[in-house]
Amino acid sequence: MKKLFAVIAALMIIGGIFCSCKNTSENAPEADAEEEIEYQTLSVDDEEYYSKFKDKGISINVYNWGEYISDGADEGTLDVNAEFTKLTGITVNYSTYATNEELYAKLKGGGSSYDIIIPSDYMISRMIKENMLKPLDFKNIPNFKYIKDTFVNPLYDQKNEYSVPYMWGTVGIIYDKTLIDENDIDWNILWNEDYADRILMFDNPRDAFAIAEIMLGYSINTENPEELEKAAEKLKEQKKVVQAYVMDEIFDKMGAGEALIAPYYAGDAITLMDEYEDLAFAVPKSGTNLFVDAMCIPSGSKQKEAAEMYINFMCEPDIAYATTTYVGYSTPNTAAYDMLDDEIKNDGISYPDDEYLKENTTVFYNLSDEANQKMQDLWTDMKSSQYEAKNVWLVPAFMLICVAVSIVILIRRHIKNKKDIF
Amino acid sequence: MKKLSRIYISLVLMFLYAPIFVLIVFSFNTTKSRSVMSGFTFDWYQKLFQNELIMMSLRNTLIIAVIASLSATILGTAAAIGISSMRKFPKMVIINITNIPIINPEIVTGVSLMLLFVFFAARMNLEFGFVTLLIAHITFNVPYVILNVMPKIRQMDPHLYEAAQDLGCNSVQAFFKVVLPEILPGVISGLLMSFTFSLDDFVVSYFTSGSTSQTLPITIYSMTRRKVSPEINALSTIIFAVVVIVLIVKNVIENRPVKPFLKAKEEGR
């Protein structure tokens, strides 16, 4: 036993040394490249505007998605919050959340006050309906002029009173380009039996239903119970070819080659494609969902003007550029877009052409409570409906074996003890 | 037979440590993948120390854990001593009441604390943040300290305290010179336990933290919308290493042969 451990340990050490040796030799050319890092500098349109609150000791509370801002961790990039403090003298208390629902619960719970939040489209329409947001004073946000027309007056905030778009993206399909032709990519490939068990699917009802609804030609914001039921039917059909319903496990499953096709968000697909050359991303021709995360000021905010200054700052071309390059999602800021490399602008992943955006994409807005409930019920029903997965018995069987082994050990010990008595 | 039990114990150990081992290995991975090992690097460790949000949260977590566990230890020890000198029936009632928060699901504690704080926030201009988080952590730590200190008090000879007073101590001296050294192991294990509890608490912190202070578990959780970065692996590896080193040091100190020390003492006499 001990010998075995020793051998394994030795192998690991040798492996480690080998790896690190290989690594140092590989790193040599990279070190040269690192010296040429371009340090991004910040210039703003109107410095005087930002000096309004200097030396007043004001702080604002920003509540953003995790990993959704440039923090200067990579050399040469801007630390956005630090730059803001340097420029305006306003301290930023930055905290993060993982889902729209978490943000909603936190605001509804009361007690904490935030000055900036960045919910997604449908959550914004819900918050507007429930009077949770303050109307913005666009006089204080001159940089709104940089926001692309497509994103002004969106469906979730039709008069554009409450929100300034921060990032956007589309839902598309990640696929293995060595095995699948780009021209075949459309939503129905996720139902294709040729790829049975190599397909992944969203594990949240809203995104999954949207795919089925697009295929059936319904609106992705439909509240019609019949249409929802038909969409659920469609998803049930798909179930036999789906390997797993997942969210961010997609990265590992696609990366390791366990699956070939998965729907996901454009920004994350780029991160994945940077690592694995075989993967590609395409936006289905028949249309898709466009999501927008936008900056808003919740009604509990006590520093509205400072918060508007922060929003304006986030719309500065330099800052928007830094954020979009760090996060990988698309920017609605035209000036920042112009600063991007042509490669990113033209690859059709982050920035599909305008005509497609106008004709074939729709944003979510909030559904009525009944429709949400209906969708949730249908989703649960779909996921729990009978299906014969092959490895279901594996875990229980293993547990049974474990229990059996321990019982055997116990009984034998018992017998031995009894023998010892005599 | 012996072989069988050995296999069994190695299986148990494997289940306990395989996840941690995997986590450590992937903290040295050159890519962000969690399944394919593609090279060896220390980059994530370097990035970790540059990530301001993680470092801030780590600092918050440590500050809160230290203050909360110290205050809870003082409160809990005092409470345990008070409880032990009660009569039988009230003693039983109080012990059971303090045990309820331990059995209670954490989420109930979290939500009820949040509701309480919201209630006061509306009236007293209290804002969620460091203070609420600290109060919450002290609250769920106190029962654990009581639980650890009580048995030590029960083991102690109740007449020691009286003897100390007979020999000229006043009550404060008697407590610090006689009672405290006697129950110290319980106090320390209570302190360590509450420290670890507030270090890794997620549920209660989630409901009681506000806009100005965020603890590490919440930060890590919020990173899951996008792919969890191996920086987290690196951080966990460091925490694991620190814990292991502390444990080893503790064991070495405890198991140091006491005999030479005693001998020296005797010779001195």
Image (cartoon, coloured by chain):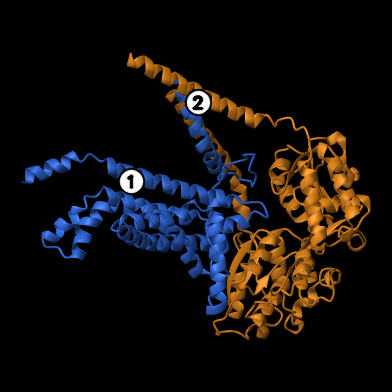
Chain colours: A orange, B blue
The image quarter containing residue A219 is bottom right
Q: Nearer the viewer, residue A362 or A148?
A: A362
Residue B193 image offset from top left, x and y in percent: 41, 52
Quadrant assignment for the N terminus of chain A: top left
Which quadrant of the view contains residue B143?
bottom left
Q: What residue type is labelled 2?
A: Ser
Reply above or below: A202 against A91: above
Query: In the visual, does A27 lie left or right of A296?
Result: left
Q: Nearer the viewer, residue A244 or A360?
A: A244
Q: In this view, does A19 lie to the left or right of A386?
A: left
Q: In this view, does A390 lie to the left or right of A25?
A: right
Residue A98, picture quadrant: bottom right
Q: Residue at x 83, y 36 (%)?
A: A195
Between A175 and A366, the one lying in front of the other is A366
Q: In this view, does B23 lie to the left or right of A102?
A: left
Res. B4 in view: no
Q: How far apart are marks 1 and 2 (CA)?
A: 33 Å
Taking the spot 68% from the left edge, 29% from the top edge, the residue there is A393
Q: Mark 2 points at which residue?
A: A406
Please give the chain letter of the residue carrying mark 2: A
- Secondary structure beneath dot 2 equals helix
Graded by Cα atoms within 10 Å as few (under 14), some (14 to 19) or many (20 or more), the crowding at tag 1 reads few
Amino acid carrying label 1: it is Lys
Residue B192 point in image, percent of width and height: 38, 53
Establish if A260 lies above or below A97.
Answer: above
Q: Viewer-proximal residue, A221 or A350?
A: A221
Label annotation for residue B250: 1
Residue depicted at 52% across the width and 58% down the height: B49
Q: Look at the numbered disc 1 and give the secondary structure of its residue.
A: helix
